[in-house]
């Protein structure tokens, strides 16, 4: 994150590292201490708490696949994904908080460019999104 923030390879500019680290520390960033798979309700509760406590306006969730792993496995994956996407959309609307959700695309052939169809469950994901960036 520090490399992206400084827009340079800091390992090649070590004399600038402290200056950029000081600037980065001034950013109002808060990190949830979740690791691995989490239930979507647990994540939404933590997000709600952060909106209330820190007045945040943007949440980045990395990634959808981890949350899907914690949901009911007897239900089809598209229904689970639709439920999670809908819950994040509702949270964003009710809390005036932007949600960026990272979704890893399907594996494609190396010579094939990624496209919207590369996202599992494309219809709901792209319909409920204001912006879709495929990297």
Image: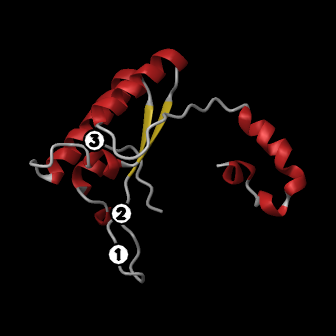
The residue that disc 1 covers is 108
Residue 81 is left or right of residue 100, and the answer is left
Residue 10 is left or right of residue 134, and the answer is right
Upstream in the sequence, badge 1 or badge 3? 3
Q: Are marks 1 and 2 in contact (CB under 8 Å)?
A: yes
**Residue 95: horizontal and vertical position, in percent?**
39, 22
Circle 3 residues within 10 Å: few <14, some 14–19, many ≥20: many
Q: How many marks?
A: 3
Examine the rendered structure and indicate whether residue 123 appears above or below residue 118: above
Examine the rendered structure and indicate whether residue 98 appears above or below residue 10: above
Circle 1 residues within 10 Å: few <14, some 14–19, many ≥20: few
The residue that disc 3 covers is 85
Distance of label 1 from label 3 (alpha carbons): 23 Å
**Residue 91: horizontal and vertical position, in percent?**
34, 28
The residue that disc 2 covers is 105
Label 2: state its secondary structure: loop
Identified at 42% across, 48% down, the residue is 131
Report which quarter residue 109 is drawn in: bottom left
Upstream in the sequence, badge 3 or badge 2? 3
Distance of label 1 from label 2 (alpha carbons): 8 Å
Label 3: state its secondary structure: helix
Identified at 78% across, 57% down, the residue is 10
Identified at 79% across, 61% down, the residue is 11
Examine the rendered structure and indicate whether residue 50 appears above or below residue 23: above
Give 46 or 108, whichever is nearer the viewer: 46
Give 111 or 54, whichever is nearer the viewer: 54
Give 4 or 130, whichever is nearer the viewer: 4
**Residue 102: horizontal and vertical position, in percent?**
41, 50
């Amino acid at each position: 994150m520090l490399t992206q923030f400084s827009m340079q390879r800091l390992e090649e500019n070590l004399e600038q590292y402290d200056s950029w680290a000081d600037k980065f520390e001034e950013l109002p960033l808060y990190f949830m201490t979740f690791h691995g798979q989490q239930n979507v309700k647990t994540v939404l509760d933590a997000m709600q708490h952060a909106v209330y406590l820190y007045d945040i306006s943007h949440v980045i969730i990395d990634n959808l696949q981890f949350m899907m792993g914690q949901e009911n496995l007897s239900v089809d994956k598209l229904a689970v994904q639709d439920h999670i996407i809908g819950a994040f959309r509702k949270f964003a609307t009710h809390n005036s908080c932007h949600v960026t959700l990272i979704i890893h695309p399907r594996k494609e052939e190396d010579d094939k460019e990624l496209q919207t169809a590369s996202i599992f469950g494309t219809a709901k994901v792209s319909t409920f999104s204001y912006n879709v960036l495929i990297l």
